[in-house]
Amino acid sequence: MSTSRALRQSFALRAGSTGFLVIWCLIAAFPIVWIAVMSFKSPVDAFASNPIDVLLGPETRAQGKGLTLIDILLGLTLLWASIKMAMNWLPGKVEAFTPKDWLLIGWLVGAGAFALAFLVVFFGILPRVTGGLNALLGLEPIIGVSSEHYIAVWVENAFYRNFLNSLLVTTGVVTVSLTVGTLAGYGLARSGSNIAFWILIIALIFRALPHSVLVAGYLPVFINSAEILRPILGENAPTLYGQPLAVIAVLVSINQPFTIWMLRSFFQNIPAELDEAARVDGCTHFQAFRWVIMPVMWPGVITTGLFSFLLAYNDFLVTSLLLDAQNQTMVPAIAGYFNRETTTTDQVEAVAAAVSITAPLFLLVMIFQRQIVSGLTAGAVKG
């Protein structure tokens, strides 16, 4: 598509904007890339004063742990192919084999299966293949790499329990937020009343308050929940403090006004004529919402769900205050590496844990990037 002469940018403007974006991407990506490199090195290499030693890992390589040229080439090829499949091949398969009524479940199952297959191939099959090729060709490692810190984090320190706790909290928050948000957002978008609008404005003001203020109000209730619920549930009344249910309730209450507001904006961009046509065809209000409006709303729902996921997944304050050590999620658990007498090995393990929690975020963005872009576009343009 050609650009008119009036809208055509000068070379200096194009070069300046492109250079700014490149510099910004490098600055934003540097900490993630650097800690990822550190997490695969021995403590001596990870905290070396010379950046070349951090990249090449001479001490790690001296321990017989490293990657040959074959390892690097095959690993990058597999990684590139996996990214392309996640962005192009997987969305088509999920939409082709999943009924429209179960599209969200299909996305979750597809993403989980793809992630599991990637882990099996990348960490299970690929090392065996490259190991045989290296032995056959007699190749020596050129870059020191070790996965011992990841093994220590996930196996010895049982970080998988924190992952399961995070999965439980985020699933609960996203499910409740989207269920309430879609119904409330649809009702507000189709309602002509100003009362609900101003109530939502007030709720958004409370959403802007620091989380510490809100948690301080919830904390006494959860601590004394057994006494509060005993007249209703008897002597077996549970204590909500330290349980994931308490965190889900607090995070939903914090996030729900933003979720309703965002989904209301998406619903307002859907013509009301669709509802009217469905009503003429004999649908009830809920049937029109379920069978006509929601299939159009999926990009907006996925975009809003991603924001809800990020709130619950990255939360530190609420989870650290309301959960005990047994039910702790991943983000506060990483801080626990620095609460004891910290060694350099502990610090590298903390870095490995921090790198681990970024993997699901990249996977979600790669898989849902089409829906996210279309959802943000739909929310930005009225009509």
Image: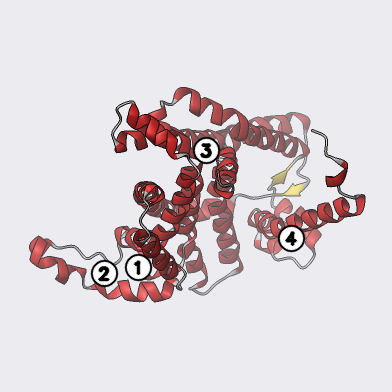
Which residue appears at 10% of the width and 61% of the height?
233
In this view, the residue in front, 166 or 160, is 166
In the image, farthest residue toward the right? 11
Q: CA distance from mark 4 to mark 1?
A: 35 Å
Task: Answer above or below: position of 46 versus 171.
Answer: below
Q: CA distance from mark 4 to mark 2?
A: 42 Å
- Residue 169 visible within the image: yes
- Visual colour scheme: secondary structure
Tell me the element at label 3.
helix
Which residue type does callout 3 highlight? Ala
Q: Position of residue 336 (x, y in %)?
A: 47, 68
Which mark sits nearer the N-terminus, 4 or 2?
4
Which mark sits nearer the N-terminus, 1 or 3?
3
Which residue type does callout 2 highlight? Phe
Quadrant assignment, res 343: bottom right
Q: Which residue is mark 3?
A: 115
Q: Which residue is mark 4?
A: 27
Q: CA distance from mark 2 to mark 3?
A: 36 Å
Q: Which residue is mark 2?
A: 222
Q: CA distance from mark 1 to mark 3?
A: 30 Å
Q: Position of residue 8 (x, y in %)?
A: 86, 45
Which residue type does callout 1 highlight? Leu
Which residue type does callout 4 highlight? Ile
Pointers 1 and 3 in contact (CB under 8 A)? no
Q: Which mark identifies residue 107? A: none
Pointers 2 and 1 in contact (CB under 8 A)? yes
Tell me the element at label 2.
helix
Quadrant assignment, res 200: bottom left
Q: Which mark identifies residue 322? A: 1
Name the side, left or right, on which 66 lies relative to 286: right
Task: Answer above or below: position of 311 versus 272.
Answer: below
Which mark sits nearer the N-terminus, 3 or 4?
4
